[in-house]
Image: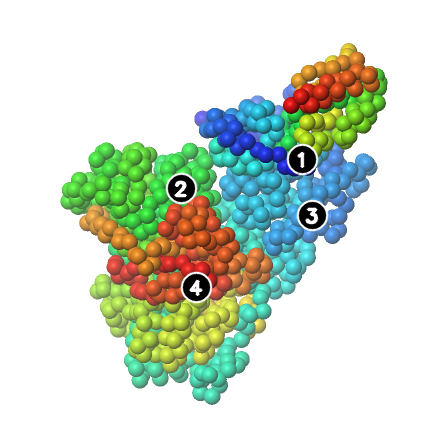
Amino acid sequence: MNPLEIDWNRLNAIIAKHRGEKWGLIPLLQDIQETIGFIPPESMEPIAHALNLHPSQVQGVVTFYAGFSLKPKGKWVLRACRGTACHVKGSRGILRLMKKELGLEEGETSPDYQFTLETVACLGACFLAPTMMVNRDYFGKLNPTKVTSILAQYGKEKGDE
Amino acid sequence: MENIVLSIDGQKVSCPPGTSVLEAAEQHGIKIPKLCYHPDLKPYGACRLCLVEDEKTGRLMASCVTPAASNMVIRTATPRIINHRRNIARLMIAEHPESCVVCSKGNHCQLRLIASQLGIGETKLHPMPNYKTLEQANPFIIRDLSKCILCGKCIRADHELVFVGAIDYNRRGFRSRPATVHDQALEKSNCTVCGTCLSMCPTGALSPKNRTYVGSPARESIAICGFCGVGCSLAMGAAGEKIVEVKPAQRPDSVNRATLCVRGHFAHDFLNVSNRLVSPLVRPNGNRRPAQLVPASWDEALEVIAKRLADIKSVNGPQSIAFLGSSKCTNEENYLLQKFARALIGTNSVDNGGYIFGQSRLRSFDERTAGGGRVNPLRGLERAEAIVVLGADPGHSLPVVGYYLKRAAGQGIPLVLVNPRRTELVNSAALWLRLQPQTDLELLNGLTALLHTKEGYDSGFIDRYTEGFSIFRYSLSALDLERVCRVTDIDRRQLDAAADLLHGKKIAFVVGQGILQQKGGQHSLNALLNLALMTGSLGKEGTGLYMLAKENNQAGALDMGAAPDRFPGRQSLKDDRVRKQWEQAWKVKLSPDQGLNLARMIMEAEKGNLKALYVMGENPLRALPATERVQKALQKLDFLVVQDILECETTRMADVVLPGAAFCEKDGSFTNLEGRIQSFSTVVPPPGHAKPDWEILDRLMAKMKNGCGYGSLEKIRAEIRQRVPMYAELDGRRQGWLRATSSKVIFGADGADGLISFSPMVSVDEPVKDEDYPFTAIFGSMRYHLGSGTRTGASRRIQELELSSEIEISPQDAAGLNFKEGEAVNVISRHGAVGAKVRLKTGILPGQIFAPLAVRGNTAMNLIGLSDLAPADSPGWKTCQVTLKPA
């Protein structure tokens, strides 16, 4: 798996935007997470410097929140819900299918940085169980066919690029 | 504000507003168990063991984070609270490895203590041990995070007390642990290994790495650290007759409280090394080199010294004998040594190791202030209005001062840093004036002139306590600020910004070796005092000049007269009244003529004029520049006596070697840089036949005058108290302070009987470019070593770091010279050459290099020529011009 090239120009621009901001750490990290897709570990020192914090403090916040990742994620982050309602409605099988289709284990990212497979404790949409998310889109009342077609939908887009 | 009255366990308790319930209870002798609370840290409420119950509401509250409120009715030990506490402790233990029996925290473990107090044996919970990797690669700290209870003390100590920020919580929930950035090992992070976290840790998660001893020490005693001039209080743990562990004493009135530095915490293992001197050594066959040094009895050795010194005195006269006192030995010992020189031999040639750090430059400062202005408690820095740090890198040289400065800056006190190099203080500084080396004087002149123009002076103070301002202000208005900016290479806007930051404020000046050792250091000091006088920055807490003494008793050795130009009490030899007093006290005739200082001793030995040298607790062969020259000079001596604790370069050349005692092996007192006189007593006996240095001197002096000696330390102290009014508080109490002996520096309401005068303004020459030696090498210290590194270099832990001689160079210069990181190069100056490895550092300006001292035999010193530091035109020992060649 090749390491992902980091766009330092974009990264530095984001850091510059928040420089010296009071309580600016989380908005800054969100900005980077959104734009770059993850928080490059090497960026923790410049971030800390810009906000007059210790790098260890930045790392503390990054590792505390599930919303921030120090590892690059795929273009599409697929989150299978493993909450109680979804479990009763067969989410275990859904997850197994996703793993098989993508060839990924939980928490893994495909070598071409297209897909990341994650599980969540609950998506808060139990009435649609079993559910999953792809980036910010919800998919509910899943069955194997639907899952395959969702995956194909994103896979197709991948082929277009 | 009125005190709050509440009831705790039925007891009426009164405390000031803002006090927590826990503190209120403790102040009244009610004990509440706690793990995450520490008086020096902000309350945190992590461990929840300090739960108390409000009787009125029935609420359970963590008492460390609950402010006391009036009419509260608090219970601290109801069955309900105890039950909760037990459950909390049980949960902690369920996650804790069952390794108490082999844990080196042993009896110091607070978790174990609390568990036993709460009567918890087995938790009867499903154990969920939290296995983490054990980290013990560095020579100082073992981290076993499976024993961490997440109290956050280490992290808070790191952030609140020492301001390094090496660690913080990482991840969350069950997986949460303190971690460095990128989860690196401590030694790879920016951790300074001060060990403050270690002494805070309530469990075995952090423990000192100790190769020679396992378990908790048998007994602990308080001592004063023998390394730098801060004078930290230590709790020294001993087993048998050896020191096995050192911790901060955590006394509220100590200078360091809960903090220490890597040297103080970990380098004391040098006390137990095999090259400690344990017996007097003499050279048989009439005591001539090259006969080997062989062990001898004390009587034999002292007999030889007494006879030889008497012979040399009668043949060559008293001026052919010199004495080198020690900035590491006690006040009492330095007093005895200079008395030995002056009263018994009749020479003023006595100095101490403080000379190396530019101590002789303090003279005109002392004369102007009549020896006053010396009491400057470091805690004042945290209450200062503004701080200016010049020529100092306290993060390395005196780390505890660095903590004070960072804490002060953290509170928002404006800190102006004057340094050519990027140091750790830069991040804390409100303004960093990155001047050219050796141009501090010009900068100070410029700053003073600017503040004068902006009317940032205290006319009340000037009128009342000073003289000569009218002439001085004339020279200020004539100063060419453009020239100042050109010489210092500081932008005019920056200079203005500095003046604005300091305008109308009382300033604390922190003055390091960079000023004292540099060319024209005494002029810079005079300019500093002028600035302090003009802004009225003297005589109040958080103002004045904080002179950073590099070694533990540098200030005291000078106070005790271990200097060629002063009597004890920093009194001038030339003062007839003073000299009469000493003549009466010692019943001898004393000369008003200045003796030889350390550099001149070597020069006179070279010429053959100096015949004998008595060295106590110094290693001039390693500490002075021009090793070869010093070695030849010492070889020319007829007689060299060295009294020391470690076998070193200088003892190997001696004709007689006397084994002395380290600071924790004797009674005595040190005076720290604040002017605090700290007395201490023996923790462990000296090894073998070694003796406390004052006892050696006392016996030798008694032998030489065929009389009896003092016999006890108290008798020496009594004489000092009587003759040196400054040391009236040297009476064996743990702490005393220097007394001001002149009303000049007391700054009372009714004025003073002597006024402090402004000194005339002096300028530095514009530097000329040196084509042959284009780089300016700046010499400085690194935190793992002190002084020339004789003691720290003997520490096994420091040795394990395998520090090599390195020079720091800017990446631009490295690219220009085609040097790569880690490449071996030769650094060549007019006086010598040394080999070193290159380290690329962005904190260095092109055209400059930084050479750390003390590593590997202190070879970097050889780049500096041996010159006398005392005259104003001395080139100084802080920088020199060099060129770099590939090795």
Q: Quadrant of residue B245?
A: bottom right
Left or right of B820 on screen, residue B127: right
Q: Which residue is disc 2 drawn over? A: B380
Marks 1 and 4, how far apart in space? 48 Å
Q: Nearer the viewer, mark 2 or mark 4?
A: 4
Q: Amino acid at mark 3?
A: Leu
Q: Which residue is disc 4 drawn over? A: B834
Marks 3 and 4, how far apart in space? 40 Å
Q: Residue at x 44, y 87 (%)?
A: B286
Q: Chain of mark 4?
A: B
Q: Amino acid at mark 4?
A: Val
Left or right of B360 on screen, residue B475: left
Q: Chain of mark 2?
A: B
Viewer-side residue, B835 vs B598: B835
Q: Quadrant of residue B638?
A: bottom left
Residue that lies at the very extreme toward the top in this rendered image = A127
Q: Residue at x 76, y 40 (%)?
A: B129
Q: Nearer the viewer, mark 3 or mark 2?
A: 3
User: Are the two marked residues, 3 and 4, in contact with CB atoms closer than 8 angstroms?
Assistant: no
Marks 3 and 1, how far apart in space? 16 Å
Marks 1 and 2, how far apart in space? 38 Å
Answer whether residue B256 is visible to the viewer in this image: yes
